[in-house]
Amino acid sequence: MNAETPEMEPTAQEGAKRRVRPEKKVEITDPKAIRALAHAARLEVISELYSTQVSRTATELAAQTGLTPSAMSYHLRALQKWGIVEPAATAGDARERRWRAAGSEFTINSGGGVASPEFAVLDLELDAFRRRVSAYAKVRDQRRKDSELTESTGLVVLSSNLLYLTPAQRSELTAKVFGLLKEYELEDPDHVPEGAERMATMWSLIPDDRK
């Protein structure tokens, strides 16, 4: 089921040069650490720092999440405790510390228990995605009212599928999806190609046990 079908666009090879970076996976397995992630602002920080691979100050992240800089500093120190973020080099004005992702990718692995705390994290991730959708809808509606909307109808894409997969096929599909996404990562996140727009993606694979 596709909500909208995107128009054909240039491939990654036809666009900006994509990033080749050393891979360093940060995997969280400690239930206490996973529970510590069950906070909307912390997940926003993880998403921002790991997706962009650009360092940010507490003030910059606070503005994005709606918190005060002091509250954001508290959350950043909590994430540092679990090895998720780390201080970054400071250029220019060194009065405020910069923070960066502690690796190139981030995963949560709780062992799949029934009461696994990552389900609380999943709820917050879905809420964050809903907020992005709501914010985009408001901006789009305002542009339509102002007769400024010029985007293609394929800008928003939603797809849902039901598949029957063996364990080996699940692993293969996951690897292929993540591999494809990596092809579209910018080589230099500080230099965004002209005409490029920041897009949020979400991909999920979960057993459908409904009878």
Image: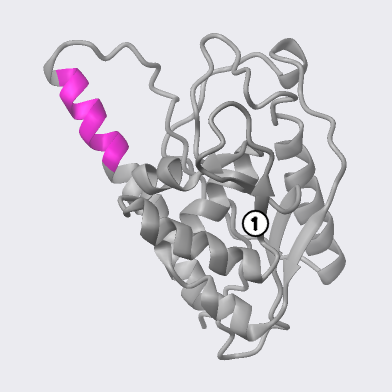
Can see residue 115?
A: yes
Residue type at tag 1: Val
Residue depicted at 51% across the width and 42% down the height? 96
Using the image as rendered, state which of residue 156 and residue 83 is in the foreground.
Answer: 83
Above or below, comparing residue 35 to residue 104 in the picture: below
In percent of width and height, residue 60 lies at: 43, 40
In the picture shown, does residue 208 fall above or below 58? below
Vertical arrangement, residue 27 with respect to residue 187, above or below: below
State the predominant SS element of the stretch in magenta.
Answer: helix
**x then y, percent, for residue 40:** 41, 63
Residue 166 sits above or below residue 204 on the image:
below
* Horizontal arrangement in the rendering, residue 22 relative to residue 157 (left or right): right
Quadrant in the picture for residue 26: bottom right
Tell me which residue sits at (71%, 74%) in the image: 109
Task: Give 167 or 11, whichever is nearer the viewer.
Answer: 11
* Numbered range of the magenta stretch: 135-144
Task: Decide which of 46, 163 is in the foreground and name it.
Answer: 46
Is residue 126 visible from the viewing direction of this image? no
Look at mark 1 in the image and give the residue it sits on. Answer: 85
Residue 139 lies left or right of residue 124; in this view the side is left
Picture coordinates of residue 58 (x, y %)?
Answer: 46, 48
* Residue occupying image coordinates x 42% and y 57%: 72
Residue 19: name its quadrant.
top right
